[in-house]
Amino acid sequence: MVRHTRAATQLSVIVLMVIAGLVSACTTGSSPATTASSGSNSSPAPVGSGAPTSAPTSAAATAGSTNDSTGGTCKYLADSDVAALFPTAGAAKITGGDTPAGTVTSCHWGTGSVASKANVVQLVVDDFKLDVALVAAKKSLTANVTEPIAGLGDFGGFSSPETDIISIEFYKGTKTALLAVAVPGMSPAAVSALALKIAAGL
């Protein structure tokens, strides 16, 4: 039991460092993989209009993981669906990698970033293959959600509030997801509809 507790603590410390790297990667085109956190609020987002400061808990990174950072097609959300909300979004930029804990994929549209809270749509999906990592990620995500959205995956909703970016977190099966949107004319209803579409396809 002591060994298990110490291991979980070490994993939580590692995830806080690596999750910050993923957010930076999504906005710069680099491609780190990330690690699951136990009980950490790593992705605050809005009650109908809020801002994530980092990506959701994600698969554990180790040396030798395979990453890529390219323009291309996001398998979780079509460019045309994003364009309906953000006409100048352009094509997705894809960042991600495989790790012992699972696979993390980030899809980024627009010229802005989550940090700048302008001209950006960002989707981060983690597909876990380690149960311990999935349990920790779901626990963290559940703690982040402050306004649930009915029918969104197995559970999900808006996260902690801000006024200039909307973010939604949810999980379904072995996957967790974070959708962050900061575009002109956005509304909670429109972003929620986009999240429901993503969840339906997971």
Image: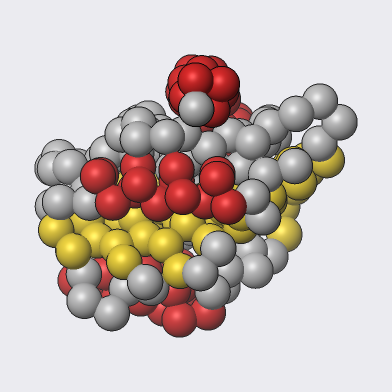
Farthest residue to the right: give it.
64
Which quadrant is home to the C terminus? bottom right
- Residue at the image position 21 percent from the left and 76 percent from the top: 150
In-image side of 135 versus 48 (left or right)? right
- Residue at the image position 63 percent from the left and 64 percent from the top: 74
In-image side of 146 versus 42 (left or right)? left
Farthest residue to the front: give it.
1
**Viewer-side residue, 87 vs 162:** 162
In-image side of 78 versus 98 (left or right)? left
How many numbered marks have been drawn onto this rendered protein structure? 0
Q: Decide if residue 184 is in sight here.
A: no
- Residue at the image position 68 percent from the left and 65 percent from the top: 73
Q: Residue 195: x percent and y percent? A: 36, 69
**Viewer-side residue, 88 vs 30:** 30
Q: Residue 80: x percent and y percent? A: 52, 75
Q: Which quadrant would residue 177 be assigned to in this image?
A: bottom left
Q: Residue 155: x percent and y percent? A: 31, 66
**Viewer-side residue, 49 vs 151:** 151
Q: Decide if residue 202 is in sight here.
A: yes
Whether residue 129 is situated above or below residue 73 in the rendered picture = above
